[in-house]
Image (tube, grey):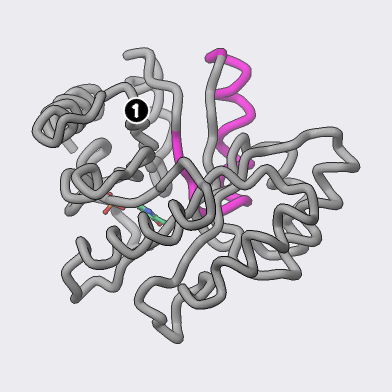
Amino acid sequence: MTFDPALGLREVLDKISLAAKACDRDPNDITLVAVSKVHGPETIVPVLQTGHRTFGENRVQEAQAKWPALKAQFQGIKLHLIGPLQTNKVKEAVQLFDVIESVDREKLAVKLAAEMEKQGRSLPVFIQVNTGEEPQKSGIFPTDVDKFVGRCRSLGLDVRGLMCIPPVEEEPSLHFMLLEKLARRNGLADLSMGMSGDFETAIEFGATFVRVGTAVFGERQQSQ
Ligand SMILES: *Cc1c(COP(=O)(O)O)cnc(C)c1O
């Protein structure tokens, strides 16, 4: 309850900066996606007031309830969808979000391309890779990434990079390394990887976006 999100943000930004310098990278090449899922405006507004503008949400409906008002109040917000997207929510997602990080199957890619065309709104997208090939997790398997990137490009999607969520019980660096290799091979500049527990490691392995929730906003009440 006493957790101060503005301070949490400051601390994470400082750690990003230090981690970047430790591996000779420019801290400005790394964007913090502050993951605000579950938290209400009372927790998010103090972070907006510091000037931070990039946020992540994992559910379309929850984001629809919170962000239109915040976007009207604060200019320049970039909202990233980092959770699974159902095809029946594509329209709403394209209207509200500024980046879609969770493109994880052909049907969704086709729908997204059509909806963006319809709305005249070409959002940057990331392809979610299931680096651990976990059956319960969404994402393209590493062996299918090259083909899927090609398919998304042929649909006209603005593919910027790859995103992954490593298996919880494994050493994340191996997954970050694999994601970096797959991105490089496909000429993709951006890597969305690293969360509260491992964002510094992700930076060492080339992350350009880190998605950090708990370390910025404190523990979440609901488990998601
Ligand atoms: C919740 C979530 C995060 C942030 O997790 P923390 O451990 O709270 O930093 C990052 N990425 C995705 C896809 C998430 O759902």
Measured along the vertical axis of the image, is residue 7 above or below residue 109?
Answer: above
Quadrant containing the C terminus in the rendered view: bottom left
Residue at the extreme bottom: 135
Q: Residue at x 36, y 38 (%)?
A: 208
Between 80 and 173, which is closer to the camera in this rendering?
173
Q: Is residue 116 left or right of residue 35?
A: right
| Residue kind at label 1, given as amino acid type | Asp
Q: Residue 7 location, x and y as percent? A: 17, 24
Where residue 106 sits, quadrant-wise, is bottom right
Magenta region? 55-75
Q: How many marks?
A: 1
Between 59 and 181, which is closer to the camera in this rendering?
181
Res. 2 visible in picture:
no
Q: Residue 61 location, x and y as percent? A: 62, 51
Measured along the vertical axis of the image, is residue 87 above or below residue 1?
Answer: below
Q: Residue at x 29, y 59 (%)?
A: 176
Measured along the vertical axis of the image, is residue 157 above or below residue 34?
Answer: below
Between 134 and 173, which is closer to the camera in this rendering?
173
Res. 144 visible in picture:
yes
Q: Residue 133 location, x and y as percent? A: 41, 81
Where residue 11 sits, quadrant-wise, is top left
Q: Which residue is mark 1?
A: 29
Q: Residue at x 29, y 66 (%)?
A: 175
Q: Secondary structure at mark 1?
A: helix
Q: Residue 152 location, x and y as percent? A: 70, 57
Q: Is residue 8 left or right of residue 55?
A: left
